[in-house]
């Protein structure tokens, strides 16, 4: 039999396309992953103590896209959840992103929103053209707060200085004048009720989808007949590193299960200044699971492990663009997802990118898309 599509990678990019092509366009799909599980980096499982953990670090779903939320709601119910993070700074635990509560607590002040605006105006450095991840923060809150909250964390996370990273990296965090302690302010914020892997199981159980795990696509691509290929692995690997390696940042996840019900005040605590790890996350606070023990994970960034983070900086974009010029040389092959497009994308952005590619591949099926008003979050 000849497959319509060979899809490499069973993370969100590959799985959304497999599901759409199979169920809406009636295509025969072979979905391959070299790992022994589906879900890509969002994969979760019950550890030996029976606690639901995320194998590749904490994943919190949030989006402003109704289309993405409604689409995913076909495959899961939701647990309303708004993420909150504390940062350990100057011996205190204060909310991050920086907001009115952060500054008042850190400096023992009682500023109003207007007072905070003046405070930032006093401290902010005028930078005519924001060029990098240092400029973004220093131009909003000044050097002192940049050093307390961003400098150490960014050096640990990326192994380079914030001034060598694109502005978009630290710009992921807003600065707020109100007392909103939430990490995200997106319209839709929720965790899949039974976890991400359960969501993927629902997504991929379709007779047109044949799943092959523990398989590197290179071992089968010339053997199994297929008309088109969708690739969601690293783009430089696909082109056999013809122009050299694109840097990816990795993380070593160290899990610990403790004989206590609750470990820390918020689901995640960031450590910009002390320790080799960047943050500690307690899974039960994300998932809402009841259990007499609790599992936490420490994140130690490094250069050597699995490719988790593309590194946004000018010379990497240049190298990416060189690889992109090779794409027309491989007809009927489509690149999508965080690794294949080398973009620091959240889950919802990857899903939106995959849905957009589906529309492009099958314009005639667009009217069949089941987006609508059916699903509401019970926040
Ligand atoms: P992936 O999930 O990486 O899937 C790619 C798949 O391709 C992998 O399973 C891989 O095994 C497979 N593959 C690669 N090469 C081959 C090959 N040669 N042959 C076969 N298979 C191959 N996003 C959020 O929205 N919220 C969060 O809180 C959040 N937290 C994150 C925390 C961490 C530590 C990390 C690393 C990411 C986080 N993200 C978060 C981002 C999120 O993980 C990604 O946006 C999303 O999972 C990317 O999906 P993808 O399908 O593009 O890639
Ligand atoms: N960041 C920081 N201090 C913090 C939190 C974030 O310096 O307490 C910077 C750091 O460079 C980080 C980036 O902001 O990599 C984006 O943070 P985010 O929490 O979005 O990272 P992710 O969850 O994707 O790892």
Image (spheres, rainbow, N blue to C red):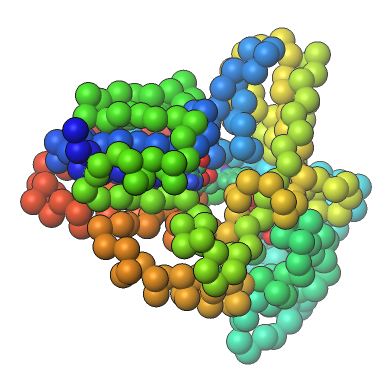
> Where does the C terminus fall, quadrant-wise?
top left
In the rendered view, tell whether residue 275 sits above or below residue 292: below
Q: Position of residue 238 (x, y in %)?
A: 46, 57
Quadrant location, ligand no. 2: bottom right
Quadrant of res 300: top right
Provide residue 267's location: percent of width, then percent of height: 67, 34
Q: Is residue 60 left or right of residue 354?
A: right
Q: Is residue 351 visible?
A: no
Extreme bottom residue here?
128
As drawn, 94 above or below 116 = above
Residue under the point 69% across and 12% down = 49
Q: Quadrant of residue 20?
A: top left
Q: Position of residue 111 (x, y in %)?
A: 74, 60
Position of 200 compared to 105: left or right? left
Residue 363 appears in view: yes
Residue 150 location (% of width, % of height) = 75, 62
Q: Quadrant of the N terminus?
A: top left
Q: Identify which residue is drawn at 32% across, 57% down.
A: 334
Along the horizontal axis of the image, is 361 left or right of 188? left
Q: Nearer the viewer, residue 159 or 153?
A: 159
Q: Is residue 355 left or right of residue 248?
A: left
Residue placed farthest to the top in the image?
A: 292
Q: Residue at x 46, y 70 (%)?
A: 323
Of residues 373 and 29, which is closer to you in this image?
Answer: 29
Quarter of the image for residue 177 reads bottom right
Above/below status of 118 relative to 206: below
């Amino acid at each position: 039999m000849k497959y319509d599509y060979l899809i490499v990678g069973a993370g969100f990019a590959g799985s959304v396309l497999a599901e759409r092509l199979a169920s809406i366009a009636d295509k025969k799909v072979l979905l391959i992953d070299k790992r022994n599980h589906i879900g890509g980096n969002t994969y979760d499982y019950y550890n030996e103590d029976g606690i639901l953990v995320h194998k590749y670090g904490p994943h919190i779903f949030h989006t402003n896209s109704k289309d993405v939320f409604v689409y995913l709601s076909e495959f899961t119910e939701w647990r309303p959840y708004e993420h909150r993070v504390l940062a350990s700074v100057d011996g205190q635990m204060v909310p991050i992103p920086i907001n009115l509560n952060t500054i008042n607590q850190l400096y023992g002040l009682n500023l109003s929103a207007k007072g905070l605006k003046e405070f930032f105006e006093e401290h902010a450095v005028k930078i005519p053209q924001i060029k990098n991840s240092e400029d973004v923060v220093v131009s909003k809150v000044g050097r002192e707060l940049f050093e307390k909250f961003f400098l150490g964390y960014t050096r640990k996370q990326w192994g380079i200085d914030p001034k060598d990273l694109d502005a978009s990296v630290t710009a992921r965090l807003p600065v707020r004048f109100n007392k909103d302690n939430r990490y995200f302010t997106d319209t839709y914020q929720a965790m899949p009720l039974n976890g991400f892997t359960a969501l993927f199981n629902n997504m991929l159980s379709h007779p047109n989808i044949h799943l092959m795990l523990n398989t590197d696509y290179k071992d089968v691509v010339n053997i199994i007949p297929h008309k088109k290929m969708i690739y969601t692995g690293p783009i430089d690997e696909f082109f056999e590193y013809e122009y050299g390696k694109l840097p990816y940042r990795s993380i070593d996840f160290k899990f610990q299960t403790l004989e206590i019900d609750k470990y820390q005040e918020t689901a995640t605590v960031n450590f910009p200044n002390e320790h080799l790890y960047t943050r500690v996350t307690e899974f039960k606070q994300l998932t809402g699971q009841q259990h007499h023990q609790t599992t936490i994970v420490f994140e130690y960034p490094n250069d050597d492990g699995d490719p988790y983070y593309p590194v946004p900086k000018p010379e990497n974009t240049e190298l990416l663009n060189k690889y992109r010029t090779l794409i027309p040389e491989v007809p009927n092959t489509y690149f999508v997802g965080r690794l294949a497009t080398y973009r620091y994308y959240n889950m919802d952005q990857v899903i939106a990118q995959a849905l957009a590619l589906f529309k492009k591949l099958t314009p005639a099926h667009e009217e069949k898309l089941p987006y609508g008003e059916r699903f509401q979050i019970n926040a």
